[in-house]
């Protein structure tokens, strides 16, 4: 190709990459972009003031993202560094309040930073294209990079002010440059690969995967030359140049490395290790289940299949078919020496990186995006290979049409799949697996798209500036477009409208009680994207408050509390925090008492005084006061369950106020049970383990039991039955346990019904994932005939007598569990 032709091809490819990413960059805000815009502002501020240590913002480390975000500031708000008083430490607050106070639109700054990201990615991929031309041929490179340009998931990620689009691009460019260096021996390719590897490391820590992989590539090259001493010397020199350039770029472009290199690197590696070992801080949704830990080794293969396109899937199958054919056609892309090795190394890169990411417990689909680009290039090999195979078998007159038409058709289909989702590229899901209609049953959907439409809908409300809106992903995804008062969804009780997002009801976050409450309300508006429900908007002006809220005097409302979950040891300190919302002004100064009682009703510990440490007569209506109480569990406290209770009283008369169900006059206990503690070492391992465990309804699991008594009891004997329950997720019903003794004739001869622990810790207070040890006693009748007996048990709702269905594994078991059989004589 002539220089002019190369320039024209580069321009056309750049436009194909740039245009679908650069339009409507101010349309919606994806998750975490608000944080990166804030960090970019902090980075700019630190640079302008010579605060080199202040350029460390996050362990990702996201340095290239912050440089490009800073470019947005320089374009839209160059005076930011002069006007900002200090760095913004709280990502939950973000930079938008400061920007708006100074007449700047945060969405405009975000769009400017995004445009810088899009431009850099497009330019880097144009360079990568010309490397690929030498590695796999012009036709394959052209098809491959057009598939990359139109890869829906990569399209979405590469137009965000974030790390994933940049890191995957830099990793791909570094890999191709090193492969071409190995093939052509051009020193410039080695330099390019090392420099871009440094950019990848500056962007996201998983890019350090390039170090062992490039080392492996160098060793395979040396192995082909039998590890001769001159070869090993050359290998050491190559790796030294490559690594030295990468490290040099890493240090040069990140001023934090100039003053505290060891601390920065330690934080990066430590955070990466913690993410790999500890996993997600919140539950995720995958394959139809809510998962608290590692979703397993199938996560990345399955999410890739959902996120990729049929064009790429078919292309990969064709590439494998083309590669394994014993005698490729003369026109085959594998007929050229070196291309089979290149394809094999690209496939190895994908497999190795996928395995590397699978080792970590924390997994998101976007973490695998560095594998998407080489897979698209491999898919192009398949389509070009199919065209070559057909050319060998069709009449001459049709060969030219096949050579150009089939790959062009593949690219056109890729465009037809991706572009209709503009600007919400994340809403694309593979139609071969069911597309957007089926994806919510398997995938955790939503990265902020749709919340922009909710914000614009509420902006059109009369006097929108006076509204308060509670929203999931409030910061950025909602607040950048709705500039008025907004609060986090947990504070919906302060709001006029509430906005719930798709993967809230998928993941059951922030808590099941909140979701159960909204599930009983009709949404004012539902926002769907490509047939999938993403957002529900609720008008809260006329709806009753949740029944799990409690009022005192129609003036103070307990809306939530915090307590240390898990076992507490005698002598240990713990804190109870009450979240109190004021409904109306209070003329009197009330006092609050928070106490800890044992199962016999004895008070073990107590804290009382003015709530929030201030007189309630000074409290403002519509405000939230967090009232903390510190306790020390007595050293002599025996193991068991202890209940936390709350009451308010008038100090002068010492009269206790009667709490009521929020918004009603329905009374609740004067000392209101709000939670419990598990104290000491409890026997969490039953002697009778149920395998598989019995799931009662959707929320409670029976993991096992102990049956204490004679091995062959006589009539009139009492049996102690200790049940080991585990709450899978929150339920709002206080269920009752029934235990039936079934005689030889199949009839119930004795039964015992009671709430777990005699109602001391009802099921509505149970903690997710915690084992509850629940003892019961049932007596064998004195006139019971000899023969085989068995215990049958279950749970039911007292108000309706409706039993919970039972399932063990995948097998339904009716509405009861047959626990154990024994002989009476």
Image: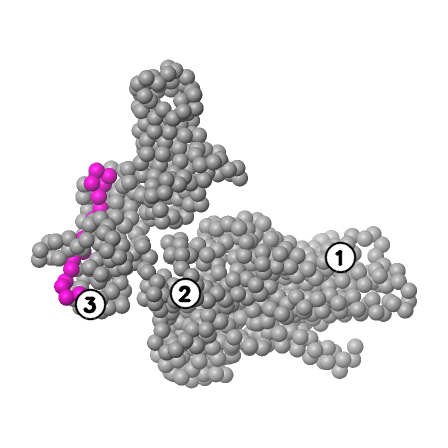
Q: Residue at x 67, y 75 (%)?
A: 16
Q: Which residue is mark 2?
A: 538
Q: Which residue is mark 1?
A: 318
Asked if labels 2 and 1 touch by Cβ distance under 8 angstroms, the answer is no
Q: Quadrant of residue 781?
A: top left
Residue range corresponding to the magenta coloring: 585-601
Instruction: State which quarter of the image contains the C terminus.
Output: top left
Q: Give the mark, 1 or 2, whose residue is nearer the N terminus.
A: 1
**Residue 473 visible at all:** no
Question: Which residue occupies the foreground of this view, 231 or 417?
Answer: 417
Q: Give the mark, 3 or 1, whose residue is nearer the N terminus.
A: 1
CA separation in Å, label 2 and label 3: 27 Å
Which color scheme does this rendered protein use? Answer: one colour
Q: Nearer the viewer, mark 3 or mark 1?
A: 3
Question: Which residue occupies the foreground of this view, 53 or 137?
Answer: 137
CA separation in Å, label 1 and label 2: 49 Å
Asked if labels 3 and 2 touch by Cβ distance under 8 angstroms, the answer is no
Q: Residue at x 70, y 66 (%)?
A: 413
Image spot of residue 819 (x, y percent):
42, 29
Image spot of residue 636 (x, y percent):
21, 39
Question: Which residue occupies the foreground of this view, 472 or 639?
Answer: 472
Q: Nearer the viewer, mark 2 or mark 3?
A: 2
Image spot of residue 183 (x, y percent):
74, 64
Q: How many marks?
A: 3
Tag of residue 775: none
Q: Which residue is mark 3?
A: 585
Q: Quadrant of residue 785?
A: top left
SS at mark 3 in the image = loop
Badge 1: how crowded within 10 Å, few (<14), some, or many (20+)?
A: many
């Amino acid at each position: 190709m002539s220089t002019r032709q190369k320039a024209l091809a580069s321009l056309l490819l750049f436009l194909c990459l740039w245009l679908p990413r650069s339009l409507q960059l101010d349309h919606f805000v994806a998750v975490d972009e608000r944080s990166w815009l804030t960090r970019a502002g902090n980075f700019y501020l630190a640079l302008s003031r010579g605060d080199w240590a202040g350029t460390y913002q996050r362990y990702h480390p996201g340095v290239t993202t912050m440089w490009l975000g800073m470019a947005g500031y320089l374009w839209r708000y160059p005076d930011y560094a002069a006007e900002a008083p200090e760095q913004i430490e709280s990502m939950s607050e973000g930079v938008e309040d400061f920007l708006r106070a100074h007449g700047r639109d945060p969405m405009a700054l975000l769009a400017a930073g995004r445009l810088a990201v899009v431009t850099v990615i497009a330019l880097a991929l144009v360079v990568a294209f010309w490397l690929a031309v030498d590695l796999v041929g012009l036709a394959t490179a052209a098809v491959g990079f057009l598939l990359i340009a139109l890869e829906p998931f990569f399209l979405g990620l590469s137009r965000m002010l974030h790390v994933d689009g940049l890191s995957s691009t830099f990793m791909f460019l570094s890999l191709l440059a090193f492969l071409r260096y190995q093939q052509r021996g051009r020193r410039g390719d080695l330099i390019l690969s090392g420099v871009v590897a440094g950019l990848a490391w500056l962007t996201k820590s998983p890019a350090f995967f390039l170090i062992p992989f490039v080392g492996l590539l160098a060793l395979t090259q040396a192995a082909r030359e039998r590890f001769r001493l001159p070869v090993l010397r050359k290998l050491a020199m190559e790796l030294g140049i490559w690594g030295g350039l990468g490290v040099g770029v890493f240090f040069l472009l990140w001023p934090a490395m100039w003053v505290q290199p060891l601390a920065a690197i330690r934080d990066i590696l430590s955070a990466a290790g913690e993410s790999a070992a500890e996993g997600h801080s919140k539950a995720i949704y995958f394959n139809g289940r809510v998962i608290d830990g590692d979703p397993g080794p199938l996560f990345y293969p399955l999410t890739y299949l959902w996120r990729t396109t049929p064009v790429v899937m078919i292309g990969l199958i064709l590439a494998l078919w083309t590669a394994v054919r014993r005698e490729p056609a003369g026109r085959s892309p594998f007929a050229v020496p070196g291309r089979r090795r290149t394809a094999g190394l690209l496939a190895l890169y994908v497999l190795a990186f996928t395995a590397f990411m699978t080792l970590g417990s924390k997994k998101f689909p976007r973490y695998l995006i560095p594998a998407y680009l080489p897979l698209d290039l491999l898919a192009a090999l398949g389509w070009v290979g199919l065209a070559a195979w057909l050319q060998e078998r069709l009449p001459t007159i049709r060969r030219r049409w096949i050579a150009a038409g089939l790959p062009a058709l593949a690219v056109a289909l890729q465009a037809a799949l991706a572009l209709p989702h503009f600007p919400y590229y994340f809403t694309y899901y593979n139609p071969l697996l069911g597309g957007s209609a089926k994806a919510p049953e398997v995938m955790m959907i939503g990265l902020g798209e749709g919340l922009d439409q909710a914000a614009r809908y509420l902006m059109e409300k009369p006097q929108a500036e006076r509204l308060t809106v509670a929203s999931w992903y409030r910061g950025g995804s909602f607040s950048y477009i709705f500039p008025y008062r907004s609060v986090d969804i947990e504070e919906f009780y302060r709001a006029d409208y509430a906005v719930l997002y798709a993967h809230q009801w998928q993941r059951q976050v922030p808590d099941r009680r909140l979701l159960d409450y909204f599930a009983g309300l009709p949404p004012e508006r539902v926002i769907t994207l490509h047939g999938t429900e993403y957002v529900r908007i609720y008008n809260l002006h006329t709806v009753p408050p949740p029944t799990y809220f409690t009022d005192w005097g129609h003036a103070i409302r307990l809306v939530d509390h915090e307590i240390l979950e898990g076992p507490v040891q005698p002598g240990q300190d713990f804190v109870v925090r009450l979240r109190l919302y004021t409904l109306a002004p209070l003329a009197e100064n009330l006092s609050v008492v928070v106490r800890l009682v044992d199962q016999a009703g004895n008070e073990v510990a107590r804290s009382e005084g003015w709530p929030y440490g201030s007189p309630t007569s000074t409290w403002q209506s519509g405000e939230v006061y967090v009232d903390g109480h510190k306790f020390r569990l007595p050293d002599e406290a025996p193991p068991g369950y202890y209940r936390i209770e709350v009451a308010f009283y008038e100090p002068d008369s010492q009269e206790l106020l009667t709490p009521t169900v929020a918004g009603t006059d329905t009374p609740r206990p004067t000392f209101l049970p709000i939670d419990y503690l598990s104290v000491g070492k409890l026997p969490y391992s039953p002697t009778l383990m149920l395998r598989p465990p019995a799931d009662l309804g959707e929320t409670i699991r029976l993991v096992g039991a102990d049956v204490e008594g004679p091995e062959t009891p006589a009539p009139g004997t009492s049996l102690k039955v200790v049940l080991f329950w585990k709450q899978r997720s929150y339920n709002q019903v206080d269920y009752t346990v029934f235990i039936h003794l079934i005689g030889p004739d199949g009839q119930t001869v004795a039964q015992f019904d009671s709430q777990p622990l005699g109602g001391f810790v009802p099921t509505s207070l149970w903690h997710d994932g915690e084992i509850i040890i629940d003892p019961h006693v049932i007596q064998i009748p004195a006139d019971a005939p000899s023969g085989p007996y068995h215990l049958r048990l279950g749970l039911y709702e007292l108000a309706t007598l409706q039993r919970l269905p039972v399932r063990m594994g995948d097998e339904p078991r009716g509405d009861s569990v047959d626990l154990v059989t024994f002989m009476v004589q």
